[in-house]
């Protein structure tokens, strides 16, 4: 019995060029290509709702629903803890919408099932979230929860169903496995709370069935140069319609490498403006566009020293040109390396080893890719310069004004607490007056470093101005905020600061405040924290006032 992977058909329904780029190039079986943070986000929510409905009625509480989300959470594809936290809070809000606006006492007789059916010697399978089989009425209700923000995914006409592989596949699966006269496809949008019903009768079914069969036949027999053009209605695979448009003029089969290259550039240039996302894109996407298999890795200078020694690191730092591929011969192996950016105060290099020299054409190909990596790296660098303080590498006051309002909006939306810690360095003027401004800069840099290391990953560390620093701490209670601030104060107090041949004794004084307990806007909250800071000063310094 012949089988077709549903992923391939789903891709073909979305965009034939996606099938060209992935499946015809031998990448279609790579499961990693079918995972991303948005898909993982949706899967986590669906799994939480599924487990919720599997439980007895007396266990269907909001707290248990949130627990099911945590148990089913897929967090592998988020670039940072901050991003994962933002998605997690959004998921909780969506599940609250579900809990308060749906029938949480419903008992489904068809849930988390997979049906198979055969057409012309080919076996297909259809997966279902929920359903209701009304045998007496010869009717079946397919229920799907959607977290999509786009109401355009509602099924309003038969053409909407024709272009939605999952819906069409599920409808056919029901008619092929159940003796029904009517199928209702219900899609509930959890963000907007809209409910979309689309009804298909047995008399209409043949038209949907015929379209499905012809579409599959088109995929199985079609010349890859003759796939239907869908300019302007692309799936987001390349995030722009460039592949669709260029494919009208350029033969794919003769220029496969060009289209892979185009996809990589699109992914790279639309990556978020942070180096973690940038590095992850290179790690995951570069291997899909190279014309040959290379086991490459990204090392920073610290990792290079730990793995290969200081001499090796010094050689690369000295000889690496700006985003150009270079190599050296060592005991019959060819070590290729390229500088790809400096972040976290460390230079980063792309490195791979071959036992034969690289073909000059391939070397030029990689240099071309590196030229776009250079563009993205410089974009991130410029963004970082606009939001970071150059001396301390903490966020600057301008970024604070933006991000503090965003975090406050998020705290209000999800009914969470938000903490502010404001502190400054005690007697800082004495360091400048006694030892010079370079000594003052030395103290600022080291206090900022300890500050950043002492905060949680999700906390936002800011140089508020001069010797004043501020932390924005999402989702924290009063005791946790005080413990965090006190730990920072003690760490700085116990730290020995050596400047030239002198030992500097450094302490801090600060104040903390919490939303919504002490204020409802950023200006008021920071003003209260500032008043508490000065209270710490009056009471002898080297303390945190709550």
Image: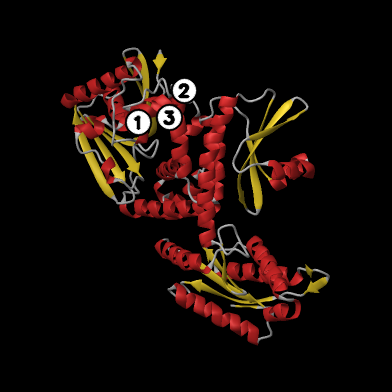
Residue topped by disc 3 = 259
Quarter of image, res 252 = top left
Q: Are marks 1 and 3 in contact (CB under 8 Å)?
A: yes
Residue 113 on image: x %, y %: 39, 31
Q: Residue at x 29, y 28 (%)?
A: 229
Residue furthest toward the right?
501
Label 1, label 3: how far apart the Cα atoms are: 9 Å
Kindly state the secondary structure of the residue where label 2 is placed. Answer: loop
Q: Residue beneath label 1, please?
A: 246
> Residue 450 at what x, y percent from top left?
68, 64
Q: Is residue 442 left or right of residue 371?
A: right
Mark 2 Cα-neighbour bin, 10 Å: few <14, some 14–19, many ≥20: few
Position of residue 222 relative to residue 50, above or below, is: above
The quadrant holding residue 174 is: top left
Residue behind mark 2: 25
Q: Mark 1 touching mark 2, by CB under 8 A?
A: no
> Along the polypeptide, which appears first: circle 3 or circle 2?
2
> Residue, x 24% and y 38% (percent of image)?
155
Farthest residue, direction bottom: 538
Task: For mark 1, give the secondary structure.
Answer: helix
Give coordinates of residue 212: x percent, y percent.
27, 23
Count the numbered circles shown: 3
Q: How far across and down, in percent of the image, does residue 25 sit? A: 46, 23
Of callouts 1 and 2, the N-terminal one: 2
**Relative to 366, residue 343 above or below:** below
Q: Earlier in the sequence, mark 1 or mark 3?
A: 1
Q: Nearer the viewer, mark 3 or mark 2?
A: 3
| Disc 1 from disc 2: Cα separation | 18 Å
Q: Quadrant of the C terminus?
A: bottom right
Tag 3 near tag 2, CB within 8 Å? no
């Amino acid at each position: 019995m012949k089988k077709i992977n549903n992923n391939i058909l789903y891709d073909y329904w979305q965009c034939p060029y996606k099938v060209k780029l992935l499946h015809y190039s031998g990448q279609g079986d790579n499961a990693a290509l079918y995972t991303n943070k948005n898909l993982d986000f949706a899967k986590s929510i669906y799994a939480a709702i599924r487990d919720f409905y599997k439980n007895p009625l007396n266990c269907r509480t909001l707290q248990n629903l949130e627990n099911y989300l945590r148990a089913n959470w897929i967090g592998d594809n988020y670039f940072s803890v901050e991003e994962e936290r933002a998605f997690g809070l959004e998921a909780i809000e969506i599940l609250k919408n579900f809990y308060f606006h749906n029938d949480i006492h419903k008992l489904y007789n068809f849930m988390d099932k997979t049906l198979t059916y055969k057409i012309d010697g080919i076996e297909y399978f259809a997966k279902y979230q929920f359903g209701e089989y009304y045998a007496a009425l010869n009717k079946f209700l397919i229920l799907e929860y959607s977290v999509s923000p786009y109401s355009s995914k509602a099924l309003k006409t038969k053409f909407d169903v024709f272009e939605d592989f999952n819906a069409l596949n599920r409808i056919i699966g029901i008619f092929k496995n159940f003796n029904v006269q009517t199928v209702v496809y219900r899609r509930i949008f959890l963000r907007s709370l809209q409910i979309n019903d689309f009804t298909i009768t047995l008399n209409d079914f043949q038209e949907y069935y015929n379209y499905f069969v012809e579409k599959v036949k088109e995929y199985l027999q079609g010349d890859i140069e003759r796939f239907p053009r869908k300019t302007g209605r692309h799936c987001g695979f390349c995030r722009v319609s460039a592949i669709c448009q260029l494919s009208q003029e350029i033969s794919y089969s003769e220029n496969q490498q060009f289209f892979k290259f185009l996809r990589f550039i699109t992914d790279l240039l639309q990556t978020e403006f942070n180096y973690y996302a940038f590095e992850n894109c290179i790690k995951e996407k570069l291997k899909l566009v190279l014309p040959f298999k290379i086991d490459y890795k990204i090392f920073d200078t610290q990792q290079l020293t730990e793995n290969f020694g200081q001499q090796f690191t010094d050689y690369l730092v000295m000889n690496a040109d700006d985003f150009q591929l270079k190599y050296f011969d060592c005991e019959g192996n060819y070590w290729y390396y390229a500088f790809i950016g400096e972040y976290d105060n460390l230079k980063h290099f792309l490195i791979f080893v071959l036992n034969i020299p690289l073909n000059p054409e391939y070397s030029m190909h990689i240099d071309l890719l590196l030229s776009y990596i250079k563009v993205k790296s410089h974009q991130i660098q410029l963004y970082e310069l606009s939001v970071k303080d150059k001396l301390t590498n903490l966020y600057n006051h301008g970024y604070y004004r933006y991000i503090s309002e965003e975090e406050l909006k998020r705290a209000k939306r999800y009914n969470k607490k938000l903490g502010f810690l404001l502190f400054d360095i005690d007697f800082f003027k004495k360091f400048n007056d006694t030892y010079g401004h370079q000594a003052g800069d030395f103290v600022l840099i080291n206090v900022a470093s300890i500050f950043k290391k002492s905060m949680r990953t999700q906390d936002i560390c800011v140089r508020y101005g001069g010797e004043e620093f501020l932390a924005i701490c999402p989702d924290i209670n009063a005791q946790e905020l005080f413990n965090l601030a006190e730990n920072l104060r003690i760490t700085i107090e116990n730290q020995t600061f050596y400047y030239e041949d002198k030992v500097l004794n450094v302490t801090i004084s600060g104040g903390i405040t919490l939303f919504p307990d002490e204020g409802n806007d950023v200006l008021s909250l920071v003003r209260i924290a500032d008043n508490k800071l000065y209270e710490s000063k009056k009471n002898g310094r080297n303390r945190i006032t709550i």
